[in-house]
Image (cartoon, rainbow, N blue to C red):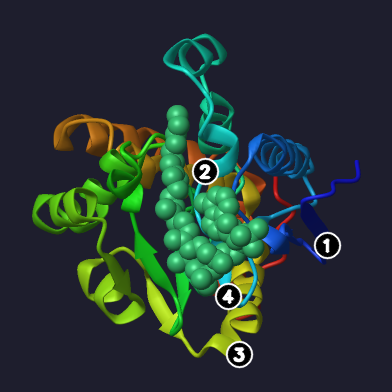
Amino acid sequence: MTYETVLLERKGRVALLTLHRPEALNALDLRVMTEVVAAAEELDRDPEVGCIVLTGSAKAFAAGADIKEMRPRSYMDMYLSDWFTTWDRLGQVRTPTLAAVSGYALGGGCELAMMCDILLAADTARFGQPEIKLGVIPGIGGSQRLTRAVGKAKAMELCLTGRTMDAVEAERAGLVSRIVPADELLSEALAVAETVAGMSKPVAMMAKEAVNRAFETTLAEGVRFERRLFHAAFATADQEEGMSAFVDKRPPRFTHR
Ligand code: CO8
C-alpha cells in the first residue's frame, strides 16, 4: 500500500517508517494515525520484516495529537468515535519496534514513542506530556507508560506542569535506552534494528512478549510466563541452529522458524 503521511522504506529485514507531515511538525491527526497503524500492521504480517523503525524529522518526531483537529470536538464526538483507539493496535504489533526520536516528542508524540519497544533519542530530543496546558490529559497511554518508565515522581511532575525534559534527563530517568548525536540517530537506529532483525524472529517476538508481560502481571506469574516461552523456544529450528553455531564456533544462520 502507499501512504501519504508516512514514508515506508525497506532495508533488508528492517522497515523504516518516517512520519511525514512537515507542515505540522508531524502532528498526529486521524490520517497519520490510520496510516501509521496500517503500515505497521502490513509490516507485521510480513515474515521478511524483523524490526520496524519509526522516526520523524530532525525538528520533530511528533508534536502531539493534532490540536486543530481536536479543538471543535465535543465529548460525544470523542466518546462515540472512541477517538484514538486505533493507536492501541500498534501495541498489538508483534514484530519488534524501535522509535528513533529527534526533536519534539510531545503529547501523543511522546506516547507514540513509548509504544515502541526500543527508544533511542538524539541529543536534540525533548519529551513531555504538555496536554494539561491545553485543558486535557494524555489520551493514548501517556499517564500509564510514562509512569511505568520513569516512576511516579517525574511522571506526575511532567503531567501536572507540562514541563518537557531533554534527552539527558530522559535517559537518566529510564525513558530512553540511549542518546546518540542527532546526525547519527538514523544510522544508529538502523544498525540496532538490523541487529534485532538478524535474530530469530519468533524468538525475538517471544522476548518482546516476555518483557511486556512485566507490565501486566505479578513477578511470579511473569516468571512463569517467561519460563513457558523459554521452553517453547526449544521447539524452534533457530534454537537448534543458534546453539549448534555456538558449539561449532560459527555465526548462526537463523531461518526464523
Ligand atoms: N497540532 C496541530 N498543529 C501543530 C501541533 C499540534 N500538536 N504542533 C505544531 N503544530 C503546527 C503549528 O500550529 C504550526 O502550524 P502553522 O505554521 O500553520 O501555524 C506548525 O506546526 C509549526 O509549529 P510552531 O510554529 O508552533 O513551531 P515552533 O518551533 O514555534 O514550536 C512546538 C514547536 C513547541 C512543538 C509547538 O509547536 C507546540 O507547542 N506544539 C504543541 C505541542 C503540544 O501541546 N502537544 C500536545 C498535543 S495534545 C495531545 O497530544 C493529546 C494526545 C492524546 C489525545 C487523546 C484523545 C483521546
Q: Which amino acid does label 4 sit on?
A: Lys
Residue occupied by mark 1: 10
Q: Residues within 10 Å of mark 1 (few under 14, many from 20)?
A: few
Cα distance in 3D space between marks 1 and 3: 21 Å
Residue at (22, 75) in percent of width and height: 172
| Res. 213 visible in picture | yes
Between label 1 and label 4, give the one nearer the viewer. 4
Q: What element carries label 2?
A: helix
Q: Which amino acid does label 2 sit on?
A: Ile
> Disc 4 vs disc 3: Cβ atoms closer than 8 Å?
no
Residue occupied by mark 3: 183
Mark 3 or mark 2: whose residue is earlier in sequence: 2
Cα distance in 3D space between marks 1 and 4: 23 Å
* Viewer-nearest residue: 148 or 61: 61
In the image, is residue 227 above or below residue 60? above
Does mark 4's beta carbon lie closer than 8 Å to ligand 1? Answer: yes
| Res. 243 visible in picture | no
Residue at (23, 30) in percent of width and height: 217
Residue at (30, 49) in percent of width and height: 133
Q: How crowded is mark 3: few (under 14 residues within 10 Å), some or many (20 or more)?
A: few
Residue occupied by mark 4: 59
